[in-house]
Amino acid sequence: MKQLERNLKALANGRRLAIIRYLRRVNEASVTDIAAEIRLSFKSTSRHLAVLSSAGVLEKKQVGLQMLHRLSSERHAIVSHVLKML
């Protein structure tokens, strides 16, 4: 139940939904690319990504000096349902 609550809170934000839509389209992206796409500062975008990551919605991997983010392959069913609606 806690995981469901965390997922719902993470998804209850327009900017985070924009991040999810963008990552669904491009597969993976850096914070800089995501911030440019959703027209938000690097710092604010990083905070949104942290919320999504801690809820298990996103995965991240280090490639050289960049951290790339993508949708988690092991996400909660509610996240998959929201993705279908976007």
Image (spheres, helix red, strand yellow):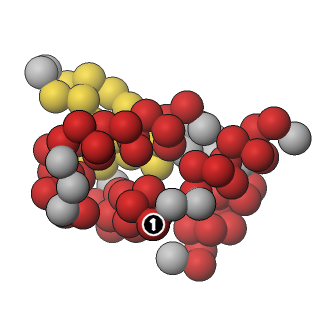
Q: Residue at x 37, y 37 (%)?
A: 47
- Check the image and report above or below for 62 versus 69: above
Q: Residue at x 26, y 23 (%)?
A: 62
Q: Position of residue 74 (x, y in %)?
A: 63, 41
Looking at this rendering, what residue extends furthest in the bottom direction? 85
Res 20 seen here: no
Tell me if mark 1 has few (under 14), some (14-19) or many (20+) residues whose alpha carbon lies within 10 angstroms of its own: few
Q: Position of residue 63 (x, y in %)?
A: 20, 25
Left or right: residue 37 versus residue 80 is left
Label count reads 1
Left or right: residue 49 versus residue 5 is left
Q: Which residue is mark 1?
A: 14
Quadrant for the N terminus in the image: top right
Look at the numbered disc 1 and give the secondary structure of its residue.
Answer: helix
- Check the image and report above or below for 10 versus 82: above
Amino acid carrying mark 1 in the image: Gly
Q: Position of residue 16 (x, y in %)?
A: 44, 57
Res 55 seen here: yes
Quarter of image, res 49: top left
Q: Residue at x 76, y 46 (%)?
A: 5
Q: Position of residue 57 (x, y in %)?
A: 55, 45
Q: Nearer the viewer, residue 56 or 48?
A: 48
Q: Residue at x 45, y 66 (%)?
A: 14
Left or right: residue 63 versus residue 49 is left
Left or right: residue 44 versus residue 37 is right
Q: Nearer the viewer, residue 48 or 25?
A: 48
